[in-house]
Image (cartoon, rainbow, N blue to C red):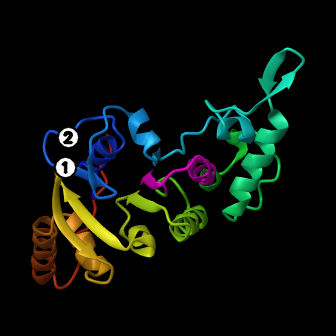
Amino acid sequence: GDNGAGKSTVIRLLSGVHQPSSGEMVMDGKPVRFRNPREAADRGIATVHQFGGTFPLMSIGRSFFVGREPTRWVGPFKIYDRRKANEIAVKAVRDFGITRIDDGDRLVGGLSGGERQSLAIARAVHFGARVLILDEPTAALGVKQASHVLRIVNEAKRRGLAVVFITHQVMHAMAVGDHFAVLIRGAIAADFGKGERTREQITDLMAGGEAMAELEAELASYQDAHHGHSPHLHPTTS
């Protein structure tokens, strides 16, 4: 869906932040209703937000285990096991094909946007996610970084995870999706499987269809009246 379509609200409903006012959510064939995000997480629903939910000033190992830190005993004291955390975090990320990460002490802030997304996805999978909700994972990334994230999404699918890929970028959705739903102002405007709609049809639907048709008609009318020339922009100064 486009901006304002209701994508963020869907994420909050699925992850237990908000309660649905109507309708029903079904998981494993049974109706579910999450009172809070913890209940959703306990059922294996993990959400990775646009900027990965990582902490720039933390190390990779610490960010990976934040809130679930491995510990070891030193005499009567229990302390954070940095070596174990680093080893597990680096291996989890490298298993997803991000081989450039080899030091768990490296700061998250030094990673690219795609690597941060990879770290967050690897973390969710490591802690038992069954449903992975990705909120605009490629929106702020360049072409190369976005392709890395799309490969990781495919790897998560190969491992048997259900992936809910929230995006307004049709090409990215079509690259990894099997089933699609287009939202417009909080309502489902279309629901279809892979190969049932073209990219142009989906884009037109997201853009409102009628509005795009009106714009095309206006441009065609202008070109007819001006011998095929498009409108010119006239910059103004103040």
Q: Can you see residue 5?
A: no
Give the x, y percent position of residue 205.
19, 69
Amino acid at pointer 1: Glu
Give the x, y percent position of residue 182.
24, 63
Instruction: Specify start and end residues of the magenta stretch as a single range.
Output: 116-137
Up-down: is 232 above or below 13? below
Give the x, y percent position of residue 135.
42, 50
Q: Is residue 47 left or right of residue 123?
A: left
Rendered image quadrant of residue 183: bottom left
Instruction: Check disc 1 and report the residue beneath it.
Output: 24
Identify the element where label 2 is drawn.
Answer: loop
Which dot marks residue 48? Answer: none
In whole angstroms, how far apart are the C-alphas of marks 2 and 1?
A: 8 Å
Up-down: is 35 above or below 164? above
Please report the residue visible at 52 percent of the width from the left and 44 percent of the height from the top. 51
Q: Can you see residue 139?
A: yes
Up-down: is 53 above or below 94? above
**Of discs 2 and 1, which sits in the foreground?**
1
The quadrant the C terminus occupies is top left
Q: Is residue 3 left or right of residue 166?
A: left
Q: How many marks?
A: 2
Amino acid at pointer 2: Pro
Asked whether residue 132 is drawn in magenta, I would say yes
Identify the element where label 1 is drawn.
Answer: loop
Instruction: Check disc 2 and report the residue beneath it.
Output: 20
Q: Is residue 161 left or right of residue 31?
A: right
Asked whether residue 104 is drawn in magenta, I would say no
Please report the residue visible at 64 percent of the width from the left and 33 percent of the height from the top. 68
C-beta proximity under 8 Å, tags 2 and 1: yes
